[in-house]
Amino acid sequence: MGGLVELPQRLFWSGAGRVFDLSDGDRLLEMYEAVFDAARSEVDLAEHLNGEILARIWPELALSPRVRRAWEEAHPELSGVQQVRVELVPAELVPAELVSSELVPTELMPPVVIAA
């Protein structure tokens, strides 16, 4: 899902940065986090959040524990979304077929995602 969304100033007050490209995953997360942080009414939430997108990105959203808990209590289907934690794995534990020393020095291997 793509497109541009401009949040009203009451939800995001950083000037020109109020326009979000929804095809950019980082900007999508930033927009949803801003709405959760600044929304003061159900109307704000309804106008700027999409349920399908919210369910998809829920594990990645940086929300306070209080907000996350309240939303998961109100919408139990969100609490069923598997949380993911990222851990650094020592290079010697990464299977050789996944390591290409020509591309990435082993000491700079990216984090490996492990299901919680």
Image (tube, rainbow, N blue to C red):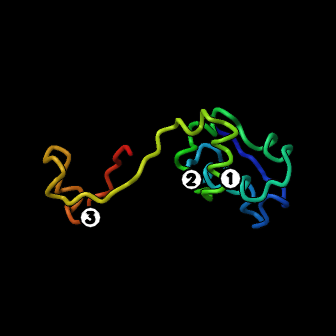
Extreme residue toward the front, this view? 73
Q: What residue type is labelled 2?
A: Asp
Sequence-earlier tag: 1 or 2: 2
Between the residue at mark 3 and the residue at mark 2, the CA separation in whole angstroms equals: 22 Å
Residue 31: assigned label: 1
Residue at 74% x, 47% y is 5
Quadrant that contains the N terminus: top right
Residue 108: assigned label: 3
**Numbered disc 3: secondary structure:** helix
Residue at 63% x, 42% y is 72
**Numbered disc 1: secondary structure:** helix
Between the residue at mark 3 and the residue at mark 1, the CA separation in whole angstroms equals: 30 Å
Residue 67 drawn at (x, y percent): 67, 53
Q: Nearer the viewer, residue 69 or 53?
A: 69
Residue 1: assigned label: none
Check disc 2 and report the residue beneath it: 26
